[in-house]
Image: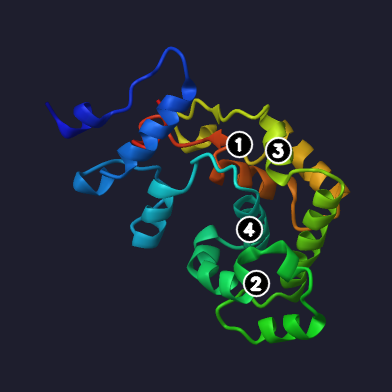
Amino acid sequence: MKLTEAMTPTKHPRSTWLGIYQNVLFCQVLNMQQITRCPWVGEQPIYIDYHDKEWGKPEFDSQKLFEKICLEGQQAGLSWITVLKKRESYREAFHQFDPKKIAKMTALDIDACMQNTGLIRHRAKLEAIVKNAKAYLEMEKCGENFSDFIWSFVNHKPIVNDVPDLRSVPAKTEASKALSKALKKRGFVFVGETTCYAFMQSMGLVDDHLNDCPCKTR
């Protein structure tokens, strides 16, 4: 029996979650064989690792979701790999994306960030992280759990899309439009409809891996 046959996740009649977590285990053996990933990945190890271990995996931790929505905003007008290569620098500069600590950052702190070559030195984007932290804390103050809020836009269950090729992947959806509108209403910035859909893809609210990608939820 081939390794791909032995390790390929199977459908479970009672739970889609089994397929999701089988998928996580399956992705751990991807580098042991010649495989066909989603074509946007390319050949850079950092991007391959991100695709195999993070992209499309359901994430429910509020702080991790907050981090990603902020980083997606940094991507605006750029490629995601540009941000990915700078992610650790962002974590260091923005207190590991602890909203309480970020919300206390001042204009002088942003001045320092503007001198940090490890960041994308776009002042409005950097200030957006502070604004978003304050909006996040205001949601908490009003009794809104960020993770529950985010996942409510897909009825708290990942959507596994039929993706035969990249042309089948939309830039935005009605759900991402609604999420963008709701985030902006709560004070978030750099959260446009396309940015929100990229966020939903990466955090596993939707699975847009191509159908023949080994990381696709089966």
Marking on residue 148? 3
Residue type of the residue flagged with mark 4: Glu
Q: Residue at x 34, y 60 (%)?
A: 45
Which callout, 3 or 4, points at the residue further toward the start of the chain? Answer: 4
Give coordinates of residue 112: x percent, y percent.
69, 86
Give neighbour class at mark 1: few <14, some 14-19, many 20+ (Cα, 10 Å).
few
Can residue 197 be seen from the camera position used here? yes
Residue type of the residue flagged with mark 1: Pro
Q: Residue at x 57, y 41 (%)?
A: 201
Q: Secondary structure at mark 2?
A: loop
Front label number (3 vs 4): 3
Which callout, 2 or 1, points at the residue further toward the start of the chain? Answer: 2
Which callout, 2 or 3, points at the residue further toward the start of the chain? Answer: 2
Which callout, 1 or 4, points at the residue further toward the start of the chain? Answer: 4
Q: CA distance from mark 1 to mark 4?
A: 23 Å
Viewed as shown, does residue 5 lie left or right of 121?
A: left
Give neighbour class at mark 4: few <14, some 14-19, many 20+ (Cα, 10 Å).
many
Q: Secondary structure at mark 3?
A: helix
Q: CA distance from mark 1 to mark 3?
A: 24 Å
Marking on residue 94? 2
Which callout, 1 or 3, points at the residue further toward the start of the chain? Answer: 3
Give coordinates of residue 38: x percent, y percent.
40, 42
Give the vertical position of 9 relative to 60 (above or below): above
Q: CA distance from mark 2 to mark 1?
A: 31 Å
Which callout, 4 or 2, points at the residue further toward the start of the chain? Answer: 4
Q: Which residue is mark 1?
A: 170
